């Protein structure tokens, strides 16, 4: 006899079992299935309830003439099948009304209406764009903006520093892009976890990245406010000097406090009519999303950043109580709207500086997997997020207990009912001032590991999304922006996912530490350069891995040993790390890349240059020999994650003004110049 709970879970895309990285089939606990279904508004608590819910689900599907969301594979793709005798009308994105079969549909979002037998249904019609052309052969830097301090910074790198970096990298080195970590808005108040990958909002950037002196109204400060801002700037200069002298870590909370106090003074400066019109145009463009974000920020100043503990009437962004509070807090709401605007302006300026410097791509922004459960997006989009659930990862060899990222996942049903508009909005925000968007954990467009609140990650399960619809939205937004998409597809990737991503023009990610014959599990020796993927961003390391200097020296093992993170004797770990390193150095010698007068780091980058990868990323701290990891996963206190400026091999912080003189930067620029011609035979052979 069929189990109604199992059938109900499968009908809603909830996995009842999963396969581990070692190929073992693991059943999902029944309590997990019940909890996950409940988070989607489905009652499976008893066999009778599950049976009734399943019957209701099937009946609802049978009543519909078309699903709530329909995807067409390209402007000339096959149209959805309709019931016999049905009439269909399409209201196009540009307002035109036409028949479904009246020629090819343009890419984008349309409204479909279907009538048959006295019934009428509406659906969102997503038409994916044609696959874009390949990414240009290019190279650039991988950067976390906070660590890019100049002597003009206020204690951490800012958008003025970014403009300086892209101008130098484009004009002097011929680099084509700078990939950034997420610049999303962080939670207000204390930041016990400063990770940029756990933001309050992915829809708006954080104003702590603003360069205060570059806001046009700064020049109009009167004597009194100017004196107060000068005092704040002096304190920021002291903070900045302490970081660059090596006596202090980057202290985001202090930097943000100083900047917000200064920006409140600048906000009061009257704007010219042209500036006022530009501000109004921005607020009109961003609409309700900006209003919600600014309202949450204003409410958080009064009630604290944890919205679930606010008065009940303020927990619903559409409640009358929130509307009244918005009127009472109008001045604060206006200030936070303005902060979003000036940050957007400086992001636009940085991308403009990149393109003016000759970069073909410019800024590559990073989209985090999710948001903090008490943040602005979780409040504004709560109807689309699964309450009581967290995104994570199942147990594997690297994380035997699994992972819980403490971020609420999208509800597949609610997202589809909204026509994927919330997803489109945050993608549009990330792409607005970018030549490319990196999507962290891009496999999450197809399925995510949900962990019920209060349970270990091992008691989670996969929940499936409409990957075709999610990809169509991503591709359409990227096409509208004229931008590339880079998918972070490291780790375990479900069969068919990379192919589906490639069909939409999403390029992958390849990291030298994981590229082996036989895969990262088999590790039968370094993967020969000609065997690497062409349509990918190739790098030596990432923000979560040891720097190249530390990997070469073995210092990363010593660090993990000091922090008590090793699961084997340190001698075994050192021996394995040495074997891995020596294997790669032997491969470099075989290819004639060693000895290299510029050193082993240069030779490893030259190896990347031998691959057919369309894009090559250079981790900026590798230019200076920095040995410290920016983030050490699994540590929340012993290591200063996300708080370190770029430093040299001795740990001395290197300001941006000195970084531009790094000899390795010019060496790599020469090595990567004219790179496509260096391996054209390999590329043409692949396409033959």
Image (cartoon, grey):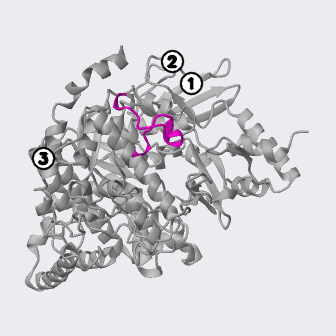
Of the residues under marks 1 and 2, which one precedes in the sequence? 1
Q: Where residue 101 is drawn, which disc sits there? A: 2
Residue 203 pos. (x, y %): 39, 56
Mark 3 — residue?
666
Task: Depth check: give the residue in front, 224 or 281.
Answer: 224
Task: Depth check: give the residue in front, 150 or 7.
Answer: 150
Mark 1 — residue?
88
Q: Residues within 10 Å of mark 3 (few under 14, many from 20)?
A: some
Q: Residues within 10 Å of mark 1 (few under 14, many from 20)?
A: some
Task: Depth check: give the residue in front, 625 or 220.
Answer: 625
* Residue farthest along the top direction in this orientation: 688
Does residue 170 belong to the magenta stretch?
no
Marker count (numbered): 3
Residue 460 pos. (x, y %): 67, 55
Side (left or right) of 661 relative to 203: left
Q: Secondary structure at mark 3?
A: helix
Task: Depth check: give the residue in front, 135 or 302.
Answer: 135
């Amino acid at each position: 006899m069929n189990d109604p709970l199992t059938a109900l879970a499968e009908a809603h895309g909830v996995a009842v079992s999963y396969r581990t990285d070692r190929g073992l089939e693991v059943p999902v606990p029944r309590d997990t299935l019940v909890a996950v279904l409940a988070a989607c508004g489905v009652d499976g608590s008893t066999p009778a309830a599950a049976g009734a819910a399943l019957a209701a689900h099937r009946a609802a599907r049978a009543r519909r003439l078309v699903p709530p969301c329909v995807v067409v594979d390209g402007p000339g793709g096959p149209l959805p099948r309709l019931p016999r005798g049905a009439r269909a009308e399409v209201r196009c994105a540009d307002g035109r009304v036409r028949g479904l079969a009246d020629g090819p549909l343009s890419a984008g979002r349309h409204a479909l209406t279907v009538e048959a037998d006295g019934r009428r249904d509406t659906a969102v019609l997503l038409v994916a764009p044609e696959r874009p052309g390949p990414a240009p052969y290019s190279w650039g830097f991988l950067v976390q903006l906070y660590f890019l301090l100049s002597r003009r910074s206020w204690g951490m790198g800012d958008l003025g520093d970014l403009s300086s970096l892209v101008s130098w990298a484009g004009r002097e080195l011929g680099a084509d892009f700078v990939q950034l970590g997420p610049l999303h808005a962080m939670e207000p108040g204390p930041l016990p976890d400063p990770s940029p990958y756990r933001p309050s909002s992915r829809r708006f950037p954080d104003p702590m990245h603003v360069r205060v002196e570059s806001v046009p109204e700064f020049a109009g400060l009167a004597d009194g406010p100017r004196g107060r801002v000068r005092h704040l700037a002096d304190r920021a200069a002291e903070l900045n000097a302490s970081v660059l002298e090596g006596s202090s870590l980057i202290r985001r909370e202090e930097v943000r406090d100083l900047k917000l106090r200064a920006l409140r003074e600048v906000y009061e400066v009257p704007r010219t009519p042209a500036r006022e019109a530009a501000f109004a145009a921005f607020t009109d463009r961003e609409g309700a999303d900006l209003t919600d974000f600014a309202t949450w920020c204003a409410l958080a100043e009064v009630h604290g950043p944890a919205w679930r503990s606010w008065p009940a009437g303020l927990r619903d962004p559409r409640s009358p109580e929130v509307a009244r509070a918005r009127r009472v807090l109008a001045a604060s709401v206006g200030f936070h709207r303005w902060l979003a605007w000036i940050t957007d302006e400086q992001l636009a300026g940085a991308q403009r500086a990149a393109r003016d410097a000759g970069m073909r791509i410019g800024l590559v922004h990073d989209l985090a997997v999710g948001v903090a459960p008490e943040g602005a997006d979780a409040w504004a989009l709560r109807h689309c997020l699964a309450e009581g659930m967290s995104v994570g990862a199942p147990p594997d060899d690297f994380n035997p207990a699994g992972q819980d990222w403490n971020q609420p996942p999208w509800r597949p049903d609610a997202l589809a009912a909204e026509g994927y508009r919330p997803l489109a909005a945050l993608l549009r925000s990330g792409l607005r001032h970018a030549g490319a968007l990196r999507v962290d954990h891009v496999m999450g467009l197809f399925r995510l590991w949900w962990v019920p609140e209060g349970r270990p990650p091992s008691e989670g399960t996969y929940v499936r999304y409409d990957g075709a619809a999610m990809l169509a939205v991503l591709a359409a937004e990227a096409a509208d922006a004229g931008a590339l998409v880079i998918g972070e597809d490291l780790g375990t990737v479900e069969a068919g996912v990379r192919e589906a991503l490639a069909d939409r023009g999403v390029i992958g990610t390849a990291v030298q530490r994981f590229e082996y014959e036989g895969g990262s599990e088999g590790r039968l020796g370094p993967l020969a350069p000609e065997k690497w993927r062409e349509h990918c961003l190739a790098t030596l390391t990432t923000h979560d891995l040891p720097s190249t200097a530390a990997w070469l020296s073995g210092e990363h093992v010593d660090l993990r040993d000091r922090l008590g993170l090793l699961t084997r004797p340190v001698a075994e770990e050192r021996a394995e790390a040495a074997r891995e390193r020596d294997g790669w150095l032997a491969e470099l010698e075989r290819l004639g890349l060693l000895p290299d007068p510029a050193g082993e780091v240069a030779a490893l980058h030259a190896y990347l240059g031998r691959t057919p990868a369309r894009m090559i990323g250079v981790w900026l701290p590798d230019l200076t020999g920095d040995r410290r990891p920016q983030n050490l996963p699994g540590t929340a206190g012993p290591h200063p994650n996300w708080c370190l400026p770029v430093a040299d091999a001795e740990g001395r912080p290197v300001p941006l003004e000195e970084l531009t003189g790094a000899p390795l930067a010019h060496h790599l620029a020469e090595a990567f110049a004219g790179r496509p011609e260096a391996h054209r035979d390999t590329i043409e052979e692949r396409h033959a």
